[in-house]
Structures are given as structure tokens and as C-alpha cells.
Image: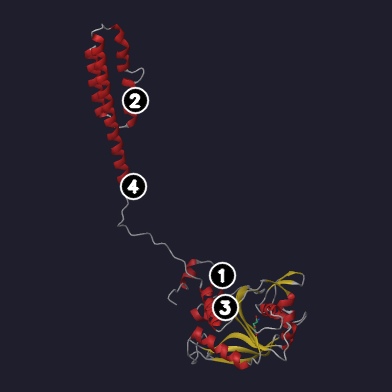
């Protein structure tokens, strides 16, 4: 029996040496040490032994059992350690590799121009206000001195939403009315309002059915056309450079009297003539004028006491001029290749 036990020990230890995976190792453990294992079977035969032999063989079985258990444990540790090392080398990170370039976003160029304009006006004490894009005919036209049936309405081909009453605003000028009504004819007003406007235009390089305007209004005592001219000068110089000049040409809007068109001197050719200014040396950027007495009255401001000026210009046109963009659609097509061209962060 002693030999049998020694044989088991030898054979197990030899097998353990060759094993390289946990599954085979645990199968081996069951085969020899399990309930129906070979070493356990030897113990079951102990009853056949004499009283003298029994403790000797019992001791030997226990000793062999411990030796086998230790060998298996040691092998198990060895396999696990090897697996860990392999995993670590598989998952190692090469920190010397160059990082993946993550494209960063930049403010939309139109947004930048609007912010620039806002800042200049805020520095002169203007509020930046908001108005609804879904507007009532009353604010978009009527109170601006453009009654129903007036031909001036045709020029602003409007998207009507509900009968003749609700529309998508065709200009930001209704915000003038809202602000004046809010102030109840009692307080001076200084505001600009950048916002989306809509017209039933077919989209092409210079037209878009949706575009941004920046509206401005100042109402106070003794405001004159000179104040408008001075204000326009400041903004033109800030946006287009200190040597930028402005001039007014007579024009016509229902909500201003007198009305003017503001031109800036061509920043590209400095007046000598080029394609941007169509060889005139001047570029039209804004409509403006002195607030019409009817409009003041409509908003509870007494035209005998109060006067004011207003202006409105297209933000895309401003951005196109400033950044040399020749197609308004570029602002609204989400083509990253196109947008990247305007991504001039150093500006
Ligand atoms: N609302 C005008 C338009 O869309 C632009 C404009 C002209 C606004 C003169 C004004 C202004 O406030 O005084 O064509």
C-alpha cells in the first residue's frame, strides 16, 4: 500500500509540472483528492489494515495529500501570475505615441459679428433686447406706420401664419414698437435687437428666406440726425477700421422721416474703385432715419417732447463684407468644410 501511495504522489507531481492551465489543474485535483479520487480511495481501504499499519499509512496519506495540495496551489499561483503578466503586456499603453487630433469648435462667424456690434453699443449704454419671431401684423407693420394695403408691404414678401394677423417677422423693427410701448412714453430708450427675420425670397448668393437683422433705436429729448450720423461713424470705425468714413443718402421708409441709407467708404480699395463697391468707392450697409412722429405717437411718446433715430442692417451682409464671403447660403449650410474657411480665431 505504501508503494501505491508513493506512486500516486510521484505521478501527480509529474503531471502537475506539465500542466499549464487552471482547468486541467482543477480536474487533476478532483481526480486524486476529490471524494471519489484515487488518494481518497486508498483511505477507504484503511479498514483492511492491521492496527499497527493503520496509523503509519494514515500518516503517510495525510503527508502525501499535503504535498499534492501544496504542489497544486503553487502551480495555480504560477499559472495565474503568468496570465496576469501576459494581460499586462497586452494592455500596455505606449505613452510616446502622438495623440489623436480632436477638432475643436469655434464660434460661428455671424455670431462673432453680432457680438462685436453688441459690445460697441453696450459700451454706449444701449440694452440688447429680444423680440418674438412669430409676430403680430400690428407690430410688424401697422404701428410702424405701414397700414393694410400699403404698397410698402409688397417689398417685404411676408410669411403669414394665421389669416392676416400672425406672421413670421419680416424685419426686426417691430421690436422698436414693443420696447417703446413697454416704456409707456415716459422713459428714454436705447436698444439694439439682433434677431432672425423671414421673407418669401428664393435663396441665392445674396438672398435667404431667413436672415439676421440688427435693429437699433434711440429715443430721448432733442435727438437729431447729427446724433445718428455720429453713432453710425463710431460703429463703422469699430467694425471696419479707424479710416472708415460714412455718408448718408436720402431714402424712404414709412417709420422714419427723414429716412437715409448709410454707406461706408470701401475698406477694400479705399475709394479708388473695386468689385466690392462696384467701382463707386462706397458700400451701402444700413437703412436708418429719424423716428416718424406717427410711430412715436402710436407708442404713446409725444413727438413734441421726444425724438429719436432708428436703424436696421443685415448681419450676414456685414459678416460677408468683413470676411470676404460671397454667398449668404454659406452661413446656413452645415458644411464643415465651408464653415472651417470662416474659422479665423485670430480675428
Ligand atoms: N426694417 C428695414 C428693412 O428691413 C430696415 C430699417 C430701415 C430699419 C430704417 C430701421 C430704419 O430701423 O430706421 O428693410
**Label 4, on which residue?**
91
**What secondary structure is found at the residue carrying circle 1?**
loop
Within 10 Å of the Cα at label 2, are there few (<14), some (14-19), or many (20+) other Cα atoms? few
Query: Of circles 2 and 1, which is in front?
Result: 2
Is 333 on the left or on the right of 144, as rendered?
Answer: left
Q: Residue at x 30, y 14 (%)?
A: 43
Within 10 Å of the Cα at label 4, are there few (<14), some (14-19), or many (20+) other Cα atoms? few
Q: Residue at x 52, y 81 (%)?
A: 321
Q: Which of the image's four quarters has the N terminus?
A: top left
Q: Which of the image's four quarters has the C terminus?
A: bottom left
Eyeballing the image, is 314 above or below 78? below
Is 218 on the left or on the right of 333, as rendered?
Answer: right
Within 10 Å of the Cα at label 1, are there few (<14), some (14-19), or many (20+) other Cα atoms? few
* Residue 276: image location, x then y, percent: 52, 85
**Label 1, on which residue?**
332
**Distance of mark 2 from mark 4, alpha carbons?**
30 Å
Task: State which quadrant residue 210 falls in.
Answer: bottom right
* Residue 196: image location, x then y, percent: 62, 73
**What secondary structure is found at the residue carrying circle 4?**
loop
**Distance of mark 2 from mark 1, alpha carbons?**
69 Å
First reached walking from the N terminus: tag 2 or tag 3: 2
**Distance of mark 4 from mark 3, alpha carbons?**
53 Å
Residue 315: which disc? 3
Task: State which quadrant residue 64 falls in.
Answer: top left
Is 259 on the left or on the right of 45, as rendered?
Answer: right
Label 2 with label 4: CB-CB less than 8 Å: no
Amino acid at each position: 500500500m505504501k508503494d501505491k501511495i508513493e506512486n500516486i504522489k510521484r505521478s501527480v507531481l509529474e503531471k502537475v509540472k506539465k500542466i499549464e492551465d487552471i482547468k486541467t489543474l482543477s480536474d487533476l485535483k478532483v481526480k486524486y483528492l476529490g471524494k471519489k479520487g484515487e488518494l481518497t480511495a486508498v483511505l477507504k481501504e484503511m479498514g483492511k489494515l492491521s492496527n499497527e499499519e493503520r496509523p503509519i499509512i494514515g500518516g503517510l496519506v495525510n503527508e502525501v495529500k499535503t504535498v499534492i495540495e501544496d504542489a497544486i496551489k503553487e502551480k495555480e499561483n504560477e499559472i495565474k501570475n503568468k496570465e496576469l503578466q501576459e494581460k499586462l503586456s497586452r494592455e500596455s499603453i505606449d505613452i510616446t505615441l502622438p495623440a489623436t487630433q480632436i477638432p475643436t469648435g469655434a464660434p460661428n462667424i455671424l455670431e462673432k459679428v453680432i457680438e462685436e456690434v453688441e459690445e460697441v453699443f453696450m459700451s454706449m449704454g444701449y440694452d440688447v433686447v429680444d423680440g418674438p419671431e412669430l409676430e403680430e401684423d400690428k407690430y410688424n407693420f401697422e404701428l410702424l406706420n405701414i397700414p393694410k394695403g400699403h404698397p410698402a408691404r409688397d417689398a417685404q414678401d411676408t410669411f403669414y401664419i394665421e389669416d392676416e394677423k400672425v406672421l413670421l417677422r419680416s424685419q426686426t423693427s417691430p421690436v422698436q414698437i414693443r420696447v417703446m410701448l413697454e416704456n409707456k412714453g415716459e422713459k428714454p430708450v436705447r436698444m439694439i435687437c439682433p434677431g432672425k427675420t423671414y421673407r418669401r425670397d428664393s435663396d441665392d448668393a445674396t438672398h435667404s428666406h431667413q436672415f439676421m437683422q440688427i435693429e437699433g433705436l434711440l429715443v430721448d429729448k432733442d435727438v437729431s440726425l447729427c446724433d445718428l450720423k455720429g453713432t453710425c461713424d463710431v460703429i463703422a470705425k469699430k467694425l471696419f477700421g479707424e479710416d472708415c468714413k460714412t455718408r448718408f443718402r436720402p431714402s424712404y421708409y414709412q417709420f422714419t422721416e427723414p429716412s437715409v441709407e448709410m454707406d461706408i467708404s470701401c475698406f477694400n480699395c479705399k475709394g479708388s474703385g473695386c468689385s466690392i463697391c462696384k467701382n463707386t468707392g462706397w458700400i451701402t450697409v444700413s437703412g436708418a432715419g429719424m423716428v416718424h412722429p406717427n410711430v412715436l405717437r402710436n407708442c404713446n411718446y409725444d413727438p413734441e417732447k421726444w425724438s429719436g433715430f432708428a436703424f436696421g442692417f443685415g448681419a450676414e451682409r456685414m459678416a460677408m463684407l468683413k470676411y470676404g464671403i460671397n454667398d449668404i447660403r454659406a452661413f446656413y449650410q452645415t458644411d464643415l468644410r465651408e464653415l472651417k474657411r470662416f474659422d479665423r480665431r485670430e480675428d
